Amino acid sequence: MSIASTQKKGFGAILWDYLTTVDHKKIGNMYLAAGAFFFLLGGIEALIIRIQLIKPENDFISAGLYNEMITMHGTTMIFFAATPMLLGFMNGVMPLQIGARDVAFPFLNSLGFWLFLLGGILMNLSWFFGGAPDAGWTGYTPLSTSSPGHGLDYYVMGLQLSGAGTLMGGINFLVTIVTMRGPGMTYMRMPLFTWTTFVTSILILFAFPALTVGLFLLQFDRMFGSAFFDVALGGNSVIWQHLFWIFGHPEVYILILPAFGIFSEIIPTFSKKRLFGYSSMVFATFLIAFLGFMVWAHHMFTVGLGPVANSIFAVGTMAIAVPTGIKIFNWLATMWGGSIKINSAMLWALGFIPSFTIGGMTGVMLGASTADFQYHDTYFVIAHFHYVIVGGVVFGILAGLHYWWPKFFGKVLNETMGKIAFWLFFIGFHLTFFIQHFLGLMGMPRRYWVFLENQGLDTGNLISTIGAFFMAAGSIVFIINIIYTTAKGEKAANDPWGTGRTLEWAISSPAPEYNFKQLPLVRGLDPYWIEKMDGNTKMTPAEPLDDIHMPNGSILPVIISIGFFIASFGFIYQVDNKSWLIVLFAGMVIAIGSMLIRSLKDDHGHHIHKEDLEKEAD
Amino acid sequence: MSHDHSLSPEIHDPAKATHEGKHKYLGLWFFLGGETVLFASFFATYLALRNSTAGGPSSQELFGLELVFVMTILLLTSSLTSVYAIYHMKNHDFKKMQLWFGITALLGLGFLGFEIYEFTHYITDYSFTFRSSAFGSAFYTLVGFHGGHVVFGLSWLTALMVRNAKRGLSLYNAPKYNTFAIYWHFIDVVWVFIFTVVYLMGMVS
Amino acid sequence: MSHWMGKLKTLLMLSFTAIVLSACGKENLTALDPKGYGAEKSMDIMILSIVIMTAVFIIVAIIFTIAVVRFREKKGREDYIPKQVEGNHTLEIVWTAIPIVLVFVLAIPTIITIFDLADTAEAESSIKVEVTGNQYWWHFDYKGEEIQTSQDLYVPVGKKVYLDIQSSDVIHSFWVPTISGKMDANPENVNTMFIEAYEEGVYWGKCAELCGPSHSLMDFKVVAVSQDEFDQWVEDMKNVNPEEKPQDAVASEGQDLFEANNCMACHAIGSSPVAVGPNLTNYANRTAVAGILEPTKENLVDWIMDPESIKPGNKMTGNYPEVSRDEAEKIAEYLMQLDHSDVNPESAGGIID
Amino acid sequence: MTGANINKINSFKKQKQKEEMKHQVITFALMIIFTLVAFIAVGAGMNKTYVIPLILILALVQVGFQFYYFMHMKDKGHEVISSLIYGGIWIAAVTVLTFTTIIWW
Ligand code: HEA
Ligand code: HEA
Ligand code: CUA
Ligand SMILES: [Cu+2]
């Protein structure tokens, strides 16, 4: 790898290295690791939910705890598992794909990560400090404003922190893509994953502020006595629902678009064929994002917004089937006529297509407002979104992990275990969630701590629970695979698949600190493939070898995040005792003080010298 | 990227002069795109709740034209003075730039002073607070968030001016001033909507 | 290989159909066997959309299968580089246009039914009931009739009944799957929805919006009876005399205890605006105790003695003096004798269990 | 490049900047006028149905001035920026529209 790591480092040094790093690849890996941790946490919560529902009137956990469990499962999975893992991919892959040495704001990148991580930790600490939030991941008011204890306060502050982090990530990626594309990398030569990163970042930029505002209102109501949702003082609980879903619906596309991007890389690579309909794929991505902002009230069909609003939002919702369909058919057409190699990464991609299609179709069914009067808030909805989220996003993440593992960690994951994990998870997934469509229609609402005996819901729930354990088994095999590969795996080549098409495969695995010794000249879409077809083994450099400018590492992002983390406790507990305001101010002083240090101290970065670069192998 | 520094060894276009400057400039603009949605959400909430006075004072009883007019003129003028500052920056006149930015800061401070006066006036004379009604919460939150942005802008500007007071203008700090100016204009944009939607419309209906 | 695969497939298919067939669910709870106007309209749209979706899915599945089977990398031809196709305009237009058409086919009937179900033209001339969702129970107030009930909503078959739905605390959602889709009960506005049951019966209602720990226990019933029986019921309910003394001594003692223990502060018998707790008129004919338990005396005693163990977080717990088992039994006896009408769940065909 | 050349270019640039500055001042004057008109319209107690659209339009035009002149959105190299800002404005508009129509009370 890079110069520094040729000497063995102690644990302390490695830890310090990660705490202070501003390297987008290391930050990407940290996002993946933290996200995976939260995924396991959310998965364990899911298992507890499923165990509680294994039989009617079960009392495995109490009613209050059950509500905490679903809230934390949903929130953890969406905000602290899926979103960050996708941000991890964006960090790790996108700069390589556009031929950049770095992201536009390395410092901000690191700050974004630490804010997310501390936000996630903060929220999970609620388990130990008097109870987790219990109003569902959607936190509907006035249930959330009247929920006793501090659970919901942790929800507000945790999401506020991590939301700020995510927003920073989004802006960072946007600027990076606009300004830092390498020589010859025009917009219409960008790989699809980069495109989806771009569009996702736009979604983040426009969606998260609505959540931020919603959370502020909730925070003010809960902590400072304002009356936004207090009906007695003229407040209105529907405002929260709008703000939440103005954020929430785009959020689901924030999750699925990067996954689409991942599949759009994997399917061509293993079909040995360029992506069919590249420009319509780009267009469809934009169209999904655009429509995605116009449909949020489909989560509110039963709120009583009136038939006109329901009709408009119903039609808007159904319209999203069109661009998504374009994507599905383009992937199929990419495989058509190709030479498909099925390994673990491709297997996840293949599993995705039918699974996601089912999920998407139930989505359109939900969009038919009249029918949604029946589906809404039942297990049919649970089935829908786990089909798109697990069958789309989680499959995408797993596909991406197998695909880019060599680029991130320098080793190829074990194929046999990869396949076993896939089949266990895939079967378990359909077993768990397919039956839930019927459960919902048979009269099982969601967020039900127990279902009653003799309501015909027993068998379905049992099957569903069994399925969840298959998924757990699959996950365990995957974990073993990671451990095994780390210990025993062989070092990966630059282009371990042999059919890599994009720039990241032109450099060593894992990528060196500076990514490209010399920025490569991009001659078209799939630049590395073009060079390979022309008989070249390497990219043509677009510049002479020279010193490389690198940003300096910094511990400030961690300190700033810790400052806000501490301040959050001040916010939460000043409700009980005003002396906690001291903690609030102390945290703020730490955070803002560090920010001041950052902006007042000049930091011009450092250079890696030409002479040192020459010593490095390619 | 842009290799045509030849034309301008100086700071003609600070938004493009350096990589870092370019990133900051774009980054701030994108951030403002997000801020647009942020303020839109506050405005929307305010509009939904502006008549929910729960028996407390209503906008017609509270607002007065004169104060808001003075505040508006102060803030609008500060926008112009920051344009002057940038004008002098482009002419490499550091002293004048600092001077005009100083005036900008003073105008902003004046605005803030009036805002604080306004709030205390409502609270003491009308017992109209953040907790009085949904209208109260929405009003103070929207206007207060704007005020918070003014505070942040002033701190940013002060930090820039103090930090660079002895250093003169350079390719390193010119983009920073320029980025600040854009942010300051945005604060003005938001205020234009606040005085129109909150105050003027509040006095009509 | 294909041998056991085939067997596995038939097995899977068989068990699948078995599940689906048995999976219409419990009669009078399932949405899949509609017996009311709203549920029927929803079902129509569901069927239309399922037909469209199945067709599209089959197409996707076929293309997918052929692609995966036919275009797998062949042994010995690992180096083969397929033609790098950029795209195909005709194809792309086709798979854009067809979904657009399908969306229209689904959207138009959807919009028609949306407006149909939101129609309040007959609201004035129909029975109107104010429905209030409370943390964990439902209150029904028949407008213009001075009748208040809780948990069991009596309606005449074949008639539109307009419900003005609201909440007294957090958001709930009123859902009787077999009769009609759901409508939220919001704290700050009234939502109007009508229901119309086609057949007599006791239909399960569920709360469909997370409202606290006992959200899953906030069940209620719609009791659809014939028009005559309904009129009879209305008559009976109007004539309830809350002061009336029970016949036997135990129940009479129960009544005294009911008063002594402050139960009256929250529970009304007869038409009374008190609605902190469920109205207990006609309690003998309740389909359930507290919405979920079988309507037996033992269950009622359990409830009175320790409601928390039955519905966590309910608003009765801790708000009345402790009652001994003996006292609870007497109160239960009293409540179980509050038989104010001959029209009861049995008239609607009984509770299906 | 010779020193004289640089000077020439500089004076050319200065000229251009003066001109731009003039535009800025005109813009500012217009903004002040718009503000005055809006305040006077309200102060004079004009009919509500006219006054609200009027002041809203005045605000929009003013904001356009800010964006285009003061914030240079009209300048070259602002294409990506303006498309994003327009995106933000679109979403803002949809949000405000919903909150003023389908939220009761
Ligand atoms: C990754 C996440 C993700 C994705 C991608 C989607 C995608 C879609 N979702 Fe989903 N959704 C969620 C996550 C997601 N959703 C979540 C988490 C919830 C619940 C939140 C909560 O309440 O907790 C939810 C809830 C939800 C609801 C509210 C249900 C309710 O609460 O009552 C609705 C209603 O319209 C809906 C619709 C859709 C639609 C139309 C799509 C479309 O984008 C799907 C488009 C795809 C296809 C249609 C398939 C491919 C297309 C073709 C093969 C072309 C031909 C097809 C046709 C002509 C039909 N979703
Ligand atoms: C990214 C999003 C995401 C993901 C991936 C999942 C994954 C899963 N979810 Fe869920 N889910 C949501 C988002 C998600 N979910 C949301 C938003 C809600 C709504 C919440 C609300 O109503 O507010 C919800 C709600 C929800 C419910 C409904 C609860 C209710 O309404 O009452 C159920 C019930 O079955 C469920 C189940 C599952 C299961 C079985 C999985 C499985 O796929 C999980 C598989 C993973 C594992 C099984 C982990 C394996 C872990 C191990 C094996 C441990 C190893 C241990 C060590 C190494 C220490 N989820
Ligand atoms: Cu009431 Cu759920
Ligand atoms: Cu949605």
Image (tube, helix red, strand yellow):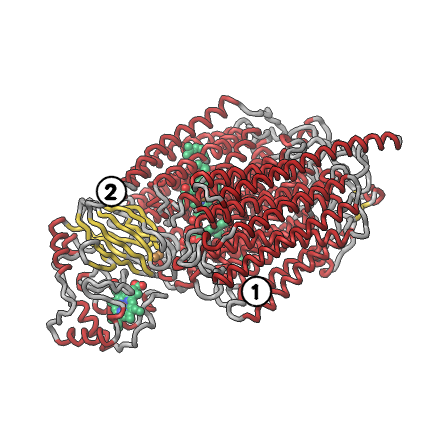
- The residue that disc 1 covers is A569
Q: Quadrant of the N terminus of chain B?
A: top right
Which structural element holds mark 1? helix
Q: Nearer the viewer, residue C123 or A434?
A: C123
Q: Amino acid at mark 2?
A: Tyr
Ligand 2 within 8 Å of disc 1? The answer is no
Q: Nearer the viewer, residue A219 or A480?
A: A219
Is the residue marked by circle 1 packed among few (<14), some (14-19), or many (20+) residues within 10 Å? some
Q: Position of residue B31 (x, y in %)?
A: 61, 45
Q: Chain of mark 2?
A: C
Q: Position of residue C341 (x, y in %)?
A: 13, 60
Q: Chain of mark 1?
A: A
- The residue that disc 2 covers is C37
Q: Position of residue B58 (x, y in %)?
A: 44, 54
Q: Nearer the viewer, residue C261 or C53?
A: C261
User: With respect to residue A612, does C142 lie above or below?
Assistant: below
Which structural element holds mark 2? helix
Q: Amino acid at mark 1?
A: Phe
Q: Give the residue displayed 33% in from the left and 68% down from the top.
A: C309
Q: Give the residue displayed 57% in from the left and 51% down from the top.
A: B146
Give the CA distance from mark 1 to mark 2: 52 Å
